[in-house]
Image: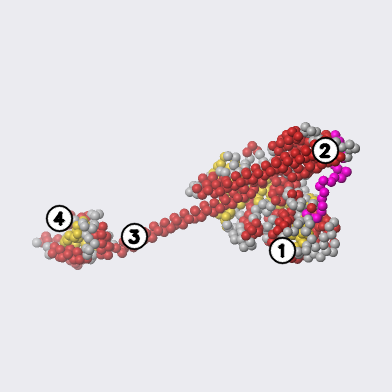
Amino acid sequence: MKKRYTIGVMIGNANSPHTMDLMQGIFHAAQSMDVNVILFLGIHSSYYYKSYFGEDVEDDYDYQFNAAYDYQAFADLDVLVIAYGSLCIFLDEKESATFLEKYRDKPRVLLEERDKTGTSTSIITDNYNGMYAIAEHLVKDHGYRNFTYLAGPHGNTDARERRQAVYDVMEKYEIPFGPERIAYGDYSSCVQKQVNHLLDAYPDMEAMICANDVMAETAYRECNKRGLIVGKDIAITGFDDWELAETMNPPLTTVLQNAFDMGYMAIIGAVELCKGKKCHSVVVSASVRIRESCGCSVDRNSYEETSILGKETHWTAIVESYLDSMLKEVLPANSNKELKGRIRDYLSLLLSVDFRASDSEENIKRGLQKLFDSELGGLLNGHSFMKVLDQFVDECIQVELRKDKPDRTIIQNLLLRKRLLNDKIVAYSIKSEKEHFSTFQQESWFVPLISKDMICHMNDEQEMYRRALVKLNALSAKASYLYIFKEPVAHYRDEEWKCPDKMYLAAYQIGQQIISYKENERPEVSTDYSRDGRVICRKKDNENYVATILCLFSGEMQYGVLAAEINPANLALFYLISRQIGNMLRMYQMSKEQKRMQQKLEALVREVREKNEVLNFLSESDALTGCMNRRGLMEKAVQMNRKNDGKEMLILFADLDHLKEINDSFGHIEGDFAIKKCAETLKSVVGENGIIGRIGGDEFCAMLPGNAEDGQRIRRLIQKKSAAFNENSDKAYYVELSVGYTIVTCSSGLAISDELKDADKALYEEKKKRRKSVKKQLDLEK
């Protein structure tokens, strides 16, 4: 099977009109040449923010998009196309010097940059001669001598060559022109400050030369605010001949640089390198388009005798003589043969109707409608299409007027057909724009739903990633892949960025099918693998693909990439989606961190609680018996009194008989044993409803619900348990307790300490009844 090449394309400033046209050329070339293309995009928006909100823009993270270029290491690429002219706008001096060196190991095509090493194919517009011609036109044909120049950014080859051309023209014609007459923009529309600086500094200037059309449009707006009429009070020129240049008021004098063609040529050059052809350089000619903005008066209704139709009078001959020139106007020069052939067929069908005939109107409508309804209708620029048809009809009129006896009916019919064509094309263009705007508006509503769905499923990571891709099929993504790092990676502005060498496929979407993986089941992609395991896009039915790589980041943190198979026309929408997903991943990461902190906090709280319990136990408990100490007993007694208001409570005092005798005769270890045994007896008698405390060496106090009868019962039970122990014990001494008690009624005015004294008195009376000695041997001798 024939190998399908995969071409990586690195582009910066992807949101500019020029770069969008470049990507469209790449996209259509990929389709016609059956190659895979992966676009690694830098999208920069901070200059828009600065234009509207001032220079002090917080949290400017545009530099994060430059990380996209390092992700080419994850793709199985045969060749790289580097649109260096768009990249170097946003690379600092150090990065610019080392950028190309990083990718020296792959065959390369350089766009908008000259190759000085002989290791790359380069494609660049003839910037110097194009700008030289337009500047010289202003000097020679208009006699202007007071100029300013709105230049492109420093470090950009296109900008440098165009600027040098302006300098050289001024020097040739001995026109005073120094660096103070130059303001530097960034090729974006956000150059209001620069334009106004020039207008303020040189209020008598005759012409402002602009390095591209987008900046020229801003110059139009700022001049209009000051009441300056472009083409009359001040001449303005541009460079690029973008699609709106001829529709500006007045139409913009500019230099044709067909970005679509250059993108198309870049893919052709890349395929040639894949096939082993040598590197070469291409300089694309740039021709001047003279219009009214420079002060020229262009009579669009006058035609020379040497028109392209010549002297032909037969309709078929007229059409054949005009068709090829029409194709050149409405299609890029490098469009593939199949596309040209299909467009030619539709135009032949339309023009096969003799516009001069009175009954041709309906057939013209049907021919136009077939073209508009076809998949090719969207490829035609409505303004250019209307322009060439206007010229065609006007020249048909000229053919008739050159006759000895012009037919007024034919001329009238041709004028009516011209109006019909204009009305239909304008209506179609308006309808298309409305549909495009309506579609974009509707699709924009989907973007917040992506973040909403992700937020709602943050407790289920697998489902959260699936939800990130649910809406993408409806947003025209044939396929999309969500790759994430194992952990987010910080990327700080002034620190070297090191791209991770591994990513993991969290979820992917092909058509309506969506697959999401559990964390431990995610396929790994790595820069170390030769082929398998690298980032890819769909291979359904062995189709080729054009995929776009967008960084997923929020703030300083990079989370991975979104790879989506989309038409570049949908880039703005997917840029918003990538930012939404990046922000949601940050929120998810913060949620995970919060949960981890919560878990740590809960563990710490548990640890503190456990330690407090130990401390409380140590401070409130008796270490020998496990009963409460005096402090613990008093705290619990107060609580019992409060909880049992109005109820009778039994306060019991117990004392181990003859502890000193046991200690003196048998040792303190035996004394401790006797104390612990007393505590066990009391615990078994009092039960869970009461409390027990050791309040002295051999003294215990208990408090439990009960009356005088309960007190007698408990005393007998203690004596019974003690007797049972002594009967079976091998100890040489008796372990016996003397017990006294008192009955109280719980109330807020009860003084627990006073009641303990009464119980202690009762105990004192009971102690008079104890044995004279606890030694069993003495008892036996008696």
Q: Looking at the image, tell me whether mark 2 or mark 3 is earlier in sequence order.
A: 2
Residue 609 place in picture, x, y as percent: 37, 59
Distance between the Cα atoms at labels 4 and 2? 132 Å
Distance between the Cα atoms at labels 3 and 4? 37 Å
Please state which of the two labelled residues, at mark 2 or mark 1, is closer to the viewer.
Answer: 2
How busy is the neighbourhood of tag 3: few (under 14 within 10 Å), some, or many (20 plus)?
A: few
Residue 181 place in picture, x, y as percent: 76, 64
- The reply, left or right, for residue 383 in relation to residue 594 is right
Examine the residues drawn in magenta and state their main secondary structure: loop
Q: Looking at the image, tell me whether mark 4 or mark 2 is earlier in sequence order.
A: 2
SS for callout 4: helix
- Name the mark on residue 411: 2
SS for callout 2: helix
Q: Looking at the image, tell me whether mark 3 or mark 1 is earlier in sequence order.
A: 1
Please state which of the two labelled residues, at mark 3 or mark 4, is closer to the viewer.
Answer: 4
**Residue wearing tag 3:** 613
Amino acid on which disc 4 is placed:
Glu
Q: Looking at the image, tell me whether mark 3 or mark 4 is earlier in sequence order.
A: 3
What segment carries the magenta color?
A: 293-314
**Residue wearing tag 4:** 709
Rendered position, 521 above or below 713: above
How busy is the neighbourhood of tag 1: few (under 14 within 10 Å), some, or many (20 plus)?
A: some
Q: Residue at x 68, y 60 (%)?
A: 92
Q: Looking at the image, tell me whether mark 2 or mark 1 is earlier in sequence order.
A: 1
Distance between the Cα atoms at labels 1 and 4? 107 Å
SS for callout 3: helix
- Name the mark on residue 229: none
Q: Residue at x 54, y 49 (%)?
A: 451
Distance between the Cα atoms at labels 2 and 3? 106 Å
**Outermost residue to the left:** 782
